[in-house]
Image (cartoon, rainbow, N blue to C red):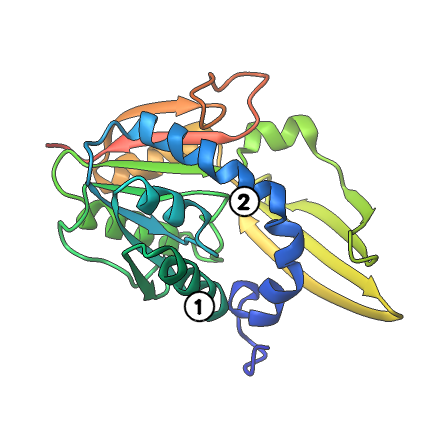
Amino acid sequence: MCKDETCEWFEDESFWSTWRPSMFPEERWEEACGEADCALELLGIGEGAHILDLCCGPGRHSLELARRGYAVTAVDRNEEFLGNLRESAEDEGLQIEIVRADMREFVREGAFDAAINLFTSFGYFENQEDDRRVVRNLFASLRPGGPLLIEMIGKEILARIFNPSECRVAEDGSLRIQIRELARDWTWIENRWIVVRNGERIEHRVAHRLYSAAELMALLAEAGFEEFECYGQLSGAPYDHTAQRLVVLARKPG
């Protein structure tokens, strides 16, 4: 739990513990293998390259990349997730550098051949200058010519599929409710995530900035990135009216 009442939602360890089963069910772990293959195809990097997985969560993609022989540095702020990743890596004999850090603080000058930020792990901060700071740190951390791959829910997609509320019964029998509200002229989304189980009700607020493809590429360009490519899935499908995700590939000049 957050000891400080002013802490942000993503700093609340209880949020991640409560919602982990919904965010990372077994099928999502199974999808990670194909997602890693697609990401590597888009990145176009050589064998054994050093990859930064920023906001790695429980490490679905870090593990898959390490299994393929890549050097992986996995960064997240959640100790429980990192502990689980550490155990999984040790069980499989995989070498993964695991770092607990805030994405706004982590930077390692010219250390990585490529970087990934997947599963809508960008735009959590009230002040957009924090997003710019993250992007500048990513730019600095990449070697010349290094690619960056970001994958999230895009504003254009959300406009097509937006549902203000959703309710379902989870496998553990709990009732899970999400209530969504668009705010700040389509630049922000406010969510209430509610769990009802055994007569107990738990609610978390989840909020993040919304980016269109053009807005995200402009933010990256401001930091110095070039050679943009935009896709509607990690598979490389076009970013059009059928897009499922916003995937942007950018490159640090060589």
Q: Nearer the viewer, residue 99 or 154?
A: 99
SS label for mark 1: helix
**Location of residue 90 by image quarter:** bottom left
Kindly give the residue lying farthest to the bottom in the view shown.
3
**Location of residue 107 by image quarter:** bottom left
Q: Picture coordinates of residue 85 (x, y %)?
A: 43, 60
Q: Is residue 181 visible?
A: yes
Kindly give the residue lying farthest to the right in the view shown.
199
Q: Quadrant of the C terminus?
A: top left
**Location of residue 38 by image quarter:** top left
> At 48% across and 20% down in the image, what residue appears?
239
Amino acid type of the residue tagged 2 in the rendering: Trp
Q: Quadrant of the N terminus?
A: bottom right
Q: Is residue 94 left or right of residue 113?
A: right
Q: Picture coordinates of residue 165 (x, y %)?
A: 79, 44
SS label for mark 2: helix
Q: Picture coordinates of residue 253 (x, y %)?
A: 14, 32
Q: Which mark is residue 83?
A: 1
The residue pinned by badge 2 equals: 29
Q: Nearer the viewer, residue 147 or 215?
A: 147
Amino acid type of the residue tagged 1 in the rendering: Gly
> At 34% across and 44% down in the image, what residue appears?
67
